[in-house]
Amino acid sequence: MTAIKESDPFIEIRDGVRAVCASFEPAYFRREGYPEEFVQALTKAGWLAALIPTEFGGSGLGLAEASVIMEEINHCGGNAGSCHGQMYNMGTLLRHGSEAQKQKYLPKIASGELRLQSMGVTEPTAGTDTTSIKTTAVRKGDRYVVNGQKVWISRVQHSDLMILLARTAAKTEKKSEGLSIFIVDLRAAVGKGITVRPIENMVNHETNELFIEDLEIPVEDRIGEEGKGFKYILDGLNAERTLIAAECIGDGRWFVEKASKYASERVVFDRPIGKNQGVQFPIAEAHIEVEAADLMRWRACELFDAGKPCGAEANMAKYLAAKASWQAGEACLQVHGGFGFAVEYDVERKFRETRLYQVAPISTNLILSYVAEHVLGMPRSF
């Protein structure tokens, strides 16, 4: 791994995260199952409370700093997908929750007593068309009764709380209206309103399908105004896309460094394969693409932390970084040849992990549609 420049403004964060990651051998991340010990170590060190204000026991840092934490986990060979949910899920609570909700939940999240790792938004028939979700929340007195289905909801088994989006109004003038956000106590809900069915998948990323039947949620656990949930959740989604971009940048740097080292040491036909331009150029190109994507990451962080609109920048950062990390992974695998498929080199694992971000949390095609419509002023394509 490359040394951290002394001029790096985030040198202390990078050093701290690397110190935690150094306690876990590469083989640890190859095993199946949730990396509980790793997440506990990050929590104990305070890294997962980065965005929580100091008055609630957190570090009071911005998205820029949070993105460095996620980047370094992946740069060190880990997978921030096991814990990144807590970073962006709490954004909805931080920006739109009541003072009472913040007092109730944030100190315990900061200390690690509670985890907020899950967000229940996606549904089988809606996909990324969030405004078409069918899960309903009907108010009955001091409670909402929720019925519906969610899919691709990660880390439910390792989270105490979940942010849930549901429809509270059947008919509205705009598709984006009539949706509300709730904070759900999973400890009470799972088995008593929520049934969880794990989904086997190609990466070590625990995700699930949820079946919700007559789940009761107290009115005081609704975040913000009724019907404004879609607007609220966009803040969290912009943070999510920016943090995922940072993770991809971490992956990209891991691939570039791994490929460069191997190409310099691997000798075939009495010469290091890295002497060949056919080997050099794809690695160099991958490095350039990763560094370029990094610039858009910082732009998105800058706008988000200033409280300014950053939808376009967050989407473009995610698009560029996911594409760059996938290109770097392809170059790294190609350079390693057959050894790239050997588990002990970790290339195949990281290759699979970074491929996810071409599809989730938003597909590259949806990002292109967003930019075409909202940035370039072209007609809506769907």
Image: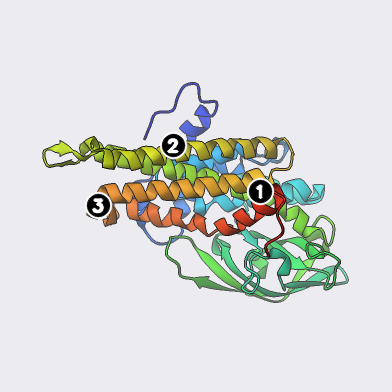
Q: Earlier in the sequence, mark 3 or mark 1?
A: 1
Q: Which mark is residue 288?
A: 2
Q: CA distance from mark 1 to mark 2?
A: 25 Å
- Residue behind mark 1: 238
Q: Nearer the viewer, residue 24 or 126?
A: 126
Q: Is residue 191 visible?
A: yes
Q: CA distance from mark 2 to mark 3?
A: 22 Å
Please state, as top left, top right, bottom left or bottom right, where the C terminus lies in the image. bottom right
Mark 3 crowdedness (10 Å alpha carbons): few <14, some 14-19, many ≥20: few
Residue at 40% from the left image edge and 41% from the top image edge: 286
Q: Position of residue 9 (x, y in %)?
A: 55, 26
**Does 364 appear above or below 208?**
above
Q: Which mark is residue 111?
A: none
- Dot 3 lies on which element? helix
- Residue behind mark 3: 337
Q: Position of residue 68 (x, y in %)?
A: 53, 37
Q: CA distance from mark 3 to mark 1?
A: 37 Å
Horizontal arrangement in the rendering, residue 358 relative to residue 202 (left or right): right
Q: Earlier in the sequence, mark 1 or mark 2?
A: 1
- Dot 1 lies on which element? helix
